[in-house]
Every structure is written in C-alpha cells, then in structure tokens.
C-alpha cells in the first residue's frame, strides 16, 4: 500500500471514530441540563461499568448459558444441582439459550 | 514539587490502565507490523485514532484489502457504544473550554470508566491529565510492539486482566457511591441477555442500548408518577 493510500485509510478510520464520540456533544449541546440527560448522566455510567465487566468476563459464557438453559427449561432441581456443580466443573448445555427459550413463545 | 502533584495523582489513577494498555498496545503494534504497516503508521494510528478495538479492526481490514466504505461502516458499528458515553458526559464536559475537544477525542472505555468514577463534579484539568496519560500508555505499548515485533518471547497471557480488574473495582466504587441498585439490576439483566442472545460483535452495543432504553422508561415512569 502506498503512503498516500495508508494516510487516507488512517484518516477515514480516525474521522469515523471521532465522529461517533463527538455526535452526542454536537447533537445535544443545548440539552445538557435537560432532566432526562441528567438522569442518564447519573445512572448510565454505573450500568455501562457493569456491562463492561460482563463483556470482559464473557469467556465464562458457557457456564452462564448452562444456567440460563436450565432455568429456561423450568427444571428447578436440575437447575439448582447445576448451580452447585457449575462452580466445580464446566456445564455442557445441550441446547443454546435461544432454542431453550423460544418454545415458550412459539 | 507542588506543580507535579496533580500529575502524580493522575499517574496513580491511570496505573491500572497502564498495565492493560501496554500489553494490548504491544499486541496491536505486533499485528500491525505483521500486516505490513510501517512503524510510523502504527504510531500515527495510535495518535489520531486511539481506539483499541477499532485499531485492531482497521489493521485486520487493511490486511484483507478492504475498501474505505467498508472500513467506515465497520468502524462506526464497532464504536457506536461511544455515543452512549457522550450522552452520559454531556453535563460533565460542559465548561471544559479548550480541553473539551481532546476529552471527547480520548473517550475510550477505560478513560470513560475512570472519569465517571471521580467523586463529585468532574475536575476538567484532572480529566485532561488522565486522558493524556492513558493515551500515552497506549502509544508506548504500540511503540513497544512495533519496535520489538514478533521477536518478543515471554508469556504475557492474563496480564490484560488488569483492565477487567479495573472495571470490577470501579463498578464497586460506583455502587458504594450511588447506593441504588437500579442501574446495576438493569445492566445485569441486559448484559446477561446480550451475552446469551447476541453475537460477540453486537454484545456491547445491544446491552448498552437496551440499558439506555430501560433507563428512559424508568425516567418516563417516574415523571408521570410525580406529575
């Protein structure tokens, strides 16, 4: 890739990234004191923090899906036993969570 | 020296981020060099883009010969969660003066976590120092990765868990200060639902979007109750 092409590539990525960060400040500049914005300013950061923790710990996804499947299947004894054993060994769910939950709504 | 004291405080605050950014930045630098980006290009990307996942994506698309439109759309989707960051910092960044453009530019996940965990009203000067130091760590990591390249030979697995640990501690700090369970209940529900139902690349946006909608609903409900 030529120097010019690389610079254009970097420039597009930089502008797009900055635009997503800048947009709320431009679009809602005059609403900074709106009660809704203040409400979001108070409650959204801690919510985002916990979501970041969940995202960072997503490697534990099979274990979590196992518990969700057991709960969705509505078998409390199995669910509780899987909770007990889940801490000691990984779960191997036979159904993915959407497949487990979908029959309830079909 | 009194003039260095604020910088020392900012340095201490950003230490956990440094432990995460150095290895991640190095990994990005190594990847970029392998794809064929020159060293100056690696550093330029960290200087003007400054988005960890966005830079990994850009390097991957560069290696795959992707077009500019594809790059723009992919970057927009990946970084769309930053829209919500700005939404919750609108009031805090008011009155930041000449620092505001840089504070907005440097709004990464980790900087957002540190800034929203500061007690009381946001000190714009301290926020600027924190943002600047965080980008410095990222630049340093990128430079290390570009300079050392694939020749780096030590097992660094797990070192980036410093960022996860930082998020956990800051979440606990926010819980202690807020003393309300509502945002955490909403986040737990949305996060776990997104984890179970959404693919990895849409997880963050889906979870944060859903949490924002629920908070909007909560605001509307209480406004009607109070009316």
Image (tube, coloured by chain):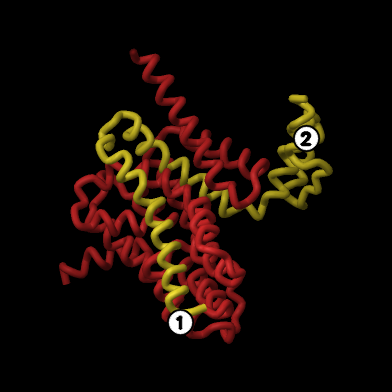
Chain colours: A yellow, B red
A86 and B59: which one is in front? B59
Q: Look at the picture and state if B137 lies above or below A62.
A: below
Q: CA distance from mark 1 to mark 2?
A: 50 Å
Q: Dividing the picture into quarters, in which one does residue B101 lie?
A: bottom left
Quadrant location, the C terminus of chain B? top left
Sort mark 2 into few (<14), some (14-19) or many (20+) by Cα contacts within 10 Å: some
Question: For mark 1, what is the residue?
Answer: B39
Residue at the image position 52 percent from the left and 78 percent from the top: A1
Q: Dividing the picture into quarters, in which one does residue A41 lie?
A: top left
Residue at the image position 38 percent from the left and 35 percent from the top: A40
Quadrant location, the N terminus of chain B? bottom left
In which chain is the residue bearing label 1?
B
Farthest-out residue, left: B2
Sort mark 1 into few (<14), some (14-19) or many (20+) by Cα contacts within 10 Å: some
> Marks 1 and 2: CB-CB under 8 Å?
no
Q: Position of residue B73 (x, y in %)?
A: 52, 54
A37 and B40: which one is in front? B40
Question: For mark 2, what is the residue?
Answer: A100
Q: Position of residue B209 (x, y in %)?
A: 50, 39
User: Which mark is on residue A97?
Assistant: none
Q: Dividing the picture into quarters, in which one does residue A103 lie?
A: top right
Looking at the rendered structure, whether the residues under marks 1 and 2 are on a common chain is answered as no
Does the rendering let one see residue A76? Answer: no
Q: Position of residue B217 (x, y in %)?
A: 46, 25
Q: SS for tag 1?
A: helix
Residue at the image position 27 percent from the left and 47 percent from the top: B93
């Amino acid at each position: 890739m030529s120097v010019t092409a690389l610079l254009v590539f970097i420039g597009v990525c930089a502008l797009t990234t900055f635009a997503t960060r800048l947009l709320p400040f431009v679009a809602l500049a005059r609403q900074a004191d709106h009660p809704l914005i203040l409400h979001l300013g108070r409650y959204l950061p801690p919510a985002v923090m916990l979501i970041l923790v969940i995202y960072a710990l997503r490697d534990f996804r099979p274990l979590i899906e196992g518990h969700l499947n057991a709960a969705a299947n509505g078998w409390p004894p199995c669910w509780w036993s899987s909770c007990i054993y889940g801490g000691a060994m990984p779960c191997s769910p036979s159904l993915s969570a959407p497949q487990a939950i979908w029959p309830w709504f079909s | 020296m009194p003039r260095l004291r604020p910088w020392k405080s900012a340095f201490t605050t950003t230490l956990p981020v440094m432990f995460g950014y150095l290895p991640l930045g190095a990994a990005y630098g190594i990847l970029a060099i392998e794809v064929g980006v020159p060293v100056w290009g690696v550093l330029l990307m960290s200087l003007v883009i400054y988005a960890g996942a966005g830079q990994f994506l850009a390097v991957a698309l560069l290696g795959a010969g992707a077009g500019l439109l594809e790059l723009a759309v992919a970057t927009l989707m990946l970084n769309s969660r930053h829209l919500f960051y700005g939404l919750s910092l609108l009031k805090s960044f008011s009155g930041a003066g000449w620092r505001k453009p840089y504070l907005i530019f440097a709004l990464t996940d980790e900087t957002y976590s540190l800034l929203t965990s500061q007690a009381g009203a946001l000190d714009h000067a301290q926020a600027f120092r924190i943002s600047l130091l965080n980008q410095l760590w990222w630049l340093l990591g990128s430079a290390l990765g570009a300079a050392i390249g694939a020749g780096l030979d030590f097992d660094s697995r797990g070192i980036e868990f410093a960022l996860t640990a930082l998020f956990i501690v800051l979440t606990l700090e926010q819980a202690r200060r807020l003393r309300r369970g509502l945002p955490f209940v909403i986040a737990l529900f949305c996060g776990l639902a997104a984890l179970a139902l959404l693919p990895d690349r849409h997880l963050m946006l889906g979870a944060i979007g859903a949490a924002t909608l629920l908070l909007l609903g909560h605001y509307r409900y209480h406004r009607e109750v109070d009316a």
